[in-house]
Image (cartoon, rainbow, N blue to C red):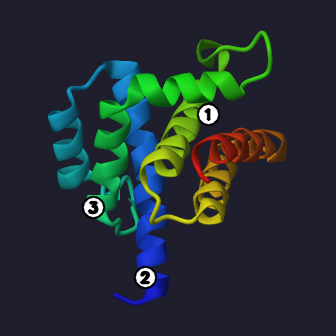
């Protein structure tokens, strides 16, 4: 796999991971069933004439299962980086999943450079939100990176 293909496959995995975390958050889908559903029906598939990009499945699994395993730790770090008076519960549900996936990578994936992780999740934010929210993702994940990466 070329670096470009790997980069695109990881970008697709990140977007799918945010979608999976959103589904888990909203529907409490059991983790094994959620991963299976994405493997069988979403990653690299065509749904309603929209083609899902081929994703790096192991990377997708790591983000989703990794967040799930470390949810309390990751949410505590994220909460500590929000402005006073803000809570994770106040955030848009999609925004919350973008931050969770990004924070997971910053905390648990030292093989992923800080700049790559942040810019990738800013790109994911652009898929759902305007520039203001993308800047919010950038600011929160930058603060997380400063706290967890030396």
Marks 1/3 in contact by CB < 8 Å: the verdict is no
Q: Which mark is residue 123?
A: none
Q: Which mark is residue 57?
A: 3
Q: Secondary structure at mark 3?
A: helix
Residue drawn 16% across and 45% down?
36
Quadrant holding the N terminus: bottom left
Give x and y (percent) for residue 86: 73, 14
Residue drawn 33% across and 66% down?
56
Q: Nearer the viewer, residue 41 or 138?
A: 138
Q: Secondary structure at mark 2?
A: helix
Marks 2/1 in contact by CB < 8 Å: the verdict is no
Q: Secondary structure at mark 1?
A: helix
Q: Which residue is tagged 1?
A: 95
Q: Which residue is tagged 2?
A: 5
Name which quarter of the figure residue 94 lies in. top right
Give x and y (percent) for residue 102: 54, 46
Marks 3/2 in contact by CB < 8 Å: the verdict is no
Give x and y (percent) for residue 66: 33, 42
Looking at the image, is 116 positioned above or below residue 109? below
Q: Is residue 25 left or right of residue 29?
A: right
Residue drawn 80% across and 14% down?
84
Q: Nearer the viewer, residue 20 or 138?
A: 138
Q: Earlier in the sequence, mark 2 or mark 1?
A: 2
Q: CA distance from mark 1 to mark 3?
A: 22 Å
Q: Nearer the viewer, residue 44 or 60?
A: 60
Looking at the image, is 144 positioned above or below residue 113? above
């Amino acid at each position: 796999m070329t670096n470009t293909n790997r980069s695109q496959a990881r970008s697709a995995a990140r977007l799918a991971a945010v979608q999976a975390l959103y589904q888990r958050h909203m529907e409490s889908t059991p983790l094994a069933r959620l991963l299976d559903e994405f493997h069988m029906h979403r990653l690299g598939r065509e749904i309603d004439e929209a083609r899902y990009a081929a994703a790096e499945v192991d990377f997708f699994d790591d983000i989703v299962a990794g967040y799930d395993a470390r949810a309390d730790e990751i949410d505590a770090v994220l909460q500590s980086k929000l402005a006073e008076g803000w809570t994770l519960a106040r955030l848009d549900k999609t925004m919350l999943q973008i931050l969770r996936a990004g924070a997971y990578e910053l905390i648990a994936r030292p093989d992923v450079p800080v700049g790559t992780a942040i810019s990738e999740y800013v790109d994911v934010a652009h898929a759902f939100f305007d520039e203001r929210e993308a800047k919010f993702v950038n600011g929160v994940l930058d603060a997380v990176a400063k706290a967890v990466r030396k």
